[in-house]
Every structure is written in C-alpha cells, then in structure tokens.
Image (cartoon, helix red, strand yellow):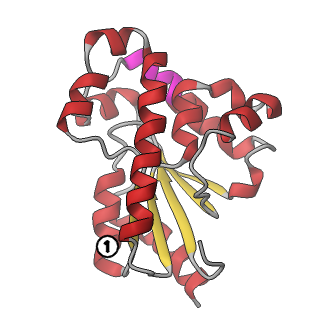
Amino acid sequence: MEDNVHIIALEGIDGAGKSTLIALLKQRYSISLYQRTKKGKIIDRLVCARLFQMHTSLQIPIYLLLSYKNYILFLFQRNKKKLVIMDRCFLSNICYFFPNAIDNQRTFNLIMRFEVPLYPKKIFILDVQPEVGQKRDENKKKLKWLTITRDAYNSTEKSPILAKYNIQIIEDSISPQEKCNIISKYIDEILK
C-alpha cells in the first residue's frame, strides 16, 4: 500500500453499528472499502451452524481464509483512493478468539504472522452493550461470547502492545451522526 494512503479501521462486536457508520462515511468521503469478513450466505450459514457456535475455535481458519480472499479481491478492485476504511481488521481475530494476546506480546506476534498485511493507522472501536449488539446482529452470537469480546475490545486502549495502532473507543450512547462526526474530525485532519 502506498505511503500516502490513510487506513482507518472500524471495529466492535457484532451489532455495534459498523455498517451504519460506513454508509455515513461514504456520503462524506471518497473511500476504498476493505471488508475483512464479507462472507456471503453459504459461509454465514456455516459459521452460524450449531457446531461452529459451540466450538468457536472452528471459525478461526474460515475467518483467516476469508480475510485473505477479501484482501486479494480488495487489491485487484481498489480504486487508488487515498482513504481506506476497513470493516474490521486484525483486532477482530484477537478480541473474538485470542483476548489474552492483548497483553501477551508472544501470543500477539504469533497471531500477527497469519494476518493479512493491511494495518490501520487508527482503529475506532464502536462500543455497544452485548445485549443490544445481539439484538441487532442477524447471526445472534452467544451473549457470553459477545460479553467477553466486548471486554477485550475495551481493554485494547490501555494495551502497550497495541499502542502504535492509535485506538479510540466511541461510546454507544451517542447517535450514529455524532459518531460519524468524531471519525470525520480525524479524517479531515489527516487529509489536510
């Protein structure tokens, strides 16, 4: 990726409002969109199957393969815009499946060896109560899993391992428009 490209990631548990914010940002900016885990109906059904919900670690290879497939498609289809918005980044894999990597450099380094080489300079985490996210999410992940994942996301701001990614948590108590304004303020600064 060229040096003058600005990569920003939107993160958060399922149902946090990432798609809504991406739609709002598309109205304001000319962006390239990278969707890490754009699945399609067959994969959606697979990862939502009872076996995969009971044993979430079975989902890891599927999500890694998806992220590489989507990364290759992104590279071919990217329209050379200076702003890339990532709908999820490496942090999803960590917070959903390996939350201990947030504070363990060795585990973090191991996980990052398998990740797509597309790293954001800024990560906005959209916070939401797990019960609310579960209601919004069409796949209805288990509440306990969403709670653990949310706790992991909320601990990332204080992780020295993740400090270089410039993480900011945006509370769910504000409107999508206000969230968009927070992100836009950052974008306007870097595009000057």
Identified at 76% across, 37% down, the residue is: 109
> What kind of secondary structure does the magenta stretch mostly adopt?
helix
Amino acid residing under circle 1: Lys
Picture quadrant of residue 47: top left
Residue 12 seen in the current view: yes
Picture quadrant of residue 137: top left
Q: Assign the N terminus to one quadrant of the image.
A: bottom right
Residue 181 is situated, as x and y percent measured from the top left of the image, at 43, 71
Residue 179 seen in the current view: no
User: Which residues fall within the magenta stretch?
Assistant: 143-149
Q: Assign the C terminus to one quadrant of the image.
A: bottom right
The question of residue 192 being in magenta is answered with no
Residue 86 is situated, as x and y percent measured from the top left of the image, at 46, 58
94 w.r.t. 54: above or below: below
Identified at 29% across, 41% down, the residue is: 39
Residue 88 is situated, as x and y percent measured from the top left of the image, at 46, 49
1 w.r.t. 39: above or below: below
Secondary element at tag 1:
helix
166 displayed left or right of 176? right
Identify residue for label 1: 26
Q: How many marks?
A: 1
Single out the residue that lies furthest toward the bottom: 192
> 2 or 76, which is in the foreground?
76
> 170 or 55, which is in the foreground?
55
Identified at 34% across, 62% down, the residue is: 22
59 w.r.t. 15: above or below: above
126 w.r.t. 76: above or below: above
3 displayed left or right of 19? right
